[in-house]
Amino acid sequence: MNTTLNVDPAEIAKFSALAHRWWDMDSEFQPLHQINPLRLEWINSILPLQGLCALDIGCGGGILADSMARKGADVLGIDLSSKALKVAQMHALEAQTPRVAYREVSAEALASEMPGQFDVVTCMEMLEHVPNPASVVQACATLVKPGGWVFFSTLNRSPKSFLLAILGAEYVLNMLPRGTHEFAKMIRPSELANYCRSSFLDVRQTSGLEYNPLTKRYWLSDDTGVNYMFAAQKQ
Ligand code: SAH
């Protein structure tokens, strides 16, 4: 299989068109800014990031990558949107973020180049935008050291998710541009668990991320019905 083709150019174009607004807290990226402290603390409570070598796959403008570097990790962020990567680099320069670098390379290509080199790999809100998510999960497993951790987050393909993440967020509340998420590409926890198992990643913890549109607040919960995260460890 030619793994370098595991990308949907329309998805990259979508994120590239908005890239200049990545660090605008009131933009389309507001949800990512709002969930970032929650996911960062969740990761850091499972695996303290200080001094670790981290890779963030599908890093976009660098919201998570930047924050992991501020927790003391050495971070490489990768993406296939050169515009998003430029914004990430610019932000790191302006904010003087230490220990963060960005590269335009696919997860699969980096997996052949740097196998087993990272203590921790994160891949958040990205799997639901790629044609073959299992191949990205496999690349994550190759990139992480034995015993290292991989953290995923994505959107469940459930009726509740259709109502909240697509109808609610894109059509009622206008939190996200219409067409941001495609229902068919969303991933059930059981499917992600299967991809992990096939890649010798043991799923150790899961968490749901819930949102209340009235209070405009997010919190971690046991409900993986919409947005959810997996913490998996390489065997
Ligand atoms: N992970 C970041 C950004 C999520 S937005 C965060 O959670 O804050 C989704 C990102 O995935 C975008 O930056 C988009 O360019 C990237 N992406 C989509 N398909 C990709 C692919 N095949 N390879 C690498 N990155 C991809």
Image (tube, rainbow, N blue to C red):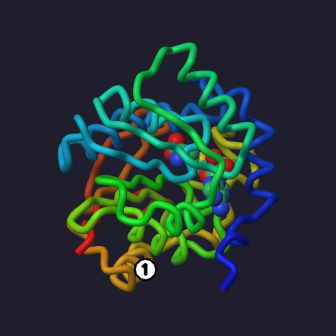
Q: How many marks?
A: 1
Q: Position of residue 19 (x, y in %)?
A: 72, 34
Image quarter for residue 175?
top right
Three-letter amino acid code at disc 1? Tyr
**Residue where numbered disc 1 is placed:** 195
Residue, x 48% and y 15% (percent of image)?
96
Question: Which of the pair 234/34 is nearer the observer?
Answer: 234
Figure check: 63 above or below 183 = above
Few, some or many residues within 10 Å of mark 1 (<14, 14–19, 20+)? some
Question: Residue 22 location in percent, x, y?
Answer: 64, 30
The residue positioned 67% from the left and 42% from the top of the image is 176
The answer to whether 7 appears left or right of 207 in the picture is: right
Q: For the point 27% across and 43% down, which residue is it?
A: 52
Is 211 in front, or is 185? 185
- The x, y position of residue 146, in whole percent, is 25, 68
Q: Is residue 190 above or below residue 40?
A: below
Residue 27: tell me if it is visible. Answer: yes
**Residue 197, how many percent across, how many down?**
33, 82
Compared across the picture, whether 172 is left or right of 165 comes to right
Quarter of the rendering occupied by the C terminus: bottom left
